[in-house]
Image (cartoon, grey):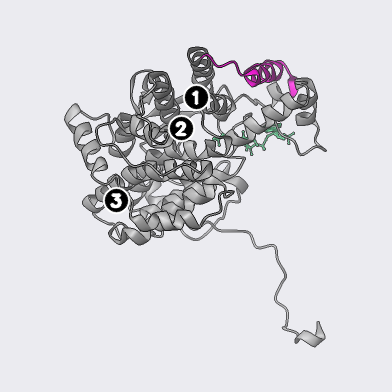
Amino acid sequence: IDIKALRGATNGLITIDPGYKNTGSCESAITFLDGEKGVLRYRGYPIEQLAEKADFLEVAYALIFGDLPTKQQLDKFHADIKSKAILDDDVKKILDAFPKSAHPMGVLSSLTSALTAFNPSSVNVDSEEEMYNAIVKIMGKFPIIVAWTMRKKQGLPLTYSTNSLGYVENIMKMMFQSPNEDYVVNPIIRDALDKLLILHADHEQNCSTSTVRIVGSSHAGLFASLSAGISALWGPLHGGANQAVLEMLEAIKQDGGDTKKYMAKAKDKNDPFRLMGFGHRVYKNFDPRAKIIKKAADEVLNDLGVNDPILDIARSLEAEALKDPYFVDRKLYPNVDFYSGIIYRAMGIPVEMFTVMFAMGRLPGWIAQWKEMRLNKEPIGRPRQIYTGENERNFKTIDNR
Ligand code: ACO
């Protein structure tokens, strides 16, 4: 297919494809996904190798700039990020204005959008240099917003970035440091968090990433595009599933742990209940990220000495689904979110923060996709429709309706 020729096509046949199940929106060199075989690669590197051997910042660099960095490239990237890891004091006032009950994802998307006001130079970016500056700014500031969002929820004093720490260790310290106490990084939690962030870092043209690309295609700024992506991620059919999974597992536990009852509900077409954390638009085989996370959940809970009964509930739901014709026929397997919440909970992260952690991981993927879209000079995203409304009719004044 001559994709370049297709780019110019605006008239003629309109394909209707609700949910874009079979519609490609762009060419991309970032993430390869084979849903039938359960394969996922970032910039050509298998997800299994990256999760095992890389750290999150290296992966972020590879996604955004095309390949894994040399030590020198990584050091420069990290130094540039650290130099921007501050927030204007007025951002605190905006945070203060939210009720404590606010959902962290609402706070995260609002503050990310608000950063546009404090960093006007990051709005109209065209050159690669302007893009780079906006990228290191958001990579530096986003973890602070993530940490503040959690601390606001918990009523804890706000923390600041520590330049001597690694990227992920710094996130942990800002999130978990108790008031008036030194923070010692727990290597088990650091390794697990690194892995989770890497596994969430990109997933080609999913709902939130497509949102970032389409908002960015109007040349709205990077932070505004990211804020829109965060809103898209929030929904329970997408990133919000990690919160929904944990709430579901907890509800099953409270209800006596009868997994069969919930399996029956999930299969009942008159019941709106779905088995959260199951199924995926593209994977029609095991989600390779779920395999890695399941193993990590076992290891992390074991290493931390946490005995969480909902892990057993999750395991038995999975075992039942794997032999149930409803799930087998529809190729519904656990997705990335089925086991991730169990690890976040063991780390001491509140359930309403789970999707924020997903956003933290997805940040470099969104950035990479936005940058690729701008550098490829993609046209403004603008799908067509099939009109199904009224034919032309005459206006009636209000007393004649
Ligand atoms: N539980 C029960 N049945 C399900 C589930 C589920 N979790 N997921 C899909 N099905 C059924 C549907 O009812 C449908 O059945 P039918 O053919 O008899 O009508 C069939 O499987 C196909 O499902 P669709 O909704 O058409 O598949 P789609 O690709 O549109 O949706 C989605 C994928 C949204 C992920 C869906 O599987 C779902 O809602 N899963 C639960 C939520 C979830 O875990 N989301 C996270 C996805 S991963 C991510 O975004 C990070």
Q: Secondary structure at mark 3?
A: helix
Q: Secondary structure at mark 1?
A: helix
> Which residues, given as a range, are shown in magenta?
305-326
Q: According to the image, label 1 marks what residue?
A: 289
Q: According to the image, label 3 marks what residue?
A: 134
Q: Is the CB–ligand 1 distance for label 2 below 8 Å?
A: yes
Task: Give the residue type that dot 2 points to.
Answer: His
Q: Residue at x 57, y 50 (%)?
A: 102
Q: According to the image, label 2 marks what residue?
A: 200
Magenta stretch, overall SS: helix
Q: Counting residues from the N terminus, which is met first, the one under dot 3 or under dot 2?
A: 3
Task: Give the residue type that dot 1 points to.
Answer: Arg
Q: Residue at x 30, y 33 (%)?
A: 62
Q: CA distance from mark 1 to mark 3?
A: 29 Å
Task: Give the residue type that dot 3 points to.
Answer: Ala
Q: Does 132 sit left or right of 238 as displayed? A: left
Q: Counting residues from the N terminus, which is met first, the one under dot 1 or under dot 2?
A: 2
Q: Quadrant of ligand 1?
A: top right
Residue 53, above or below 366: above
Q: Counting residues from the N terminus, which is met first, the one under dot 1 or under dot 3?
A: 3
Q: Secondary structure at mark 2?
A: loop
Q: CA distance from mark 3 to mark 2?
A: 22 Å
Q: For residue 85, which quarter of the picture?
A: top left
Q: State the residue lying farthest toward the front.
A: 180
Mark 1–mark 3 contact, CB under 8 Å?
no
Mark 1–mark 2 contact, CB under 8 Å?
yes
Q: CA distance from mark 1 to mark 2?
A: 8 Å
Q: Does 219 sit left or right of 351 as displayed? A: left
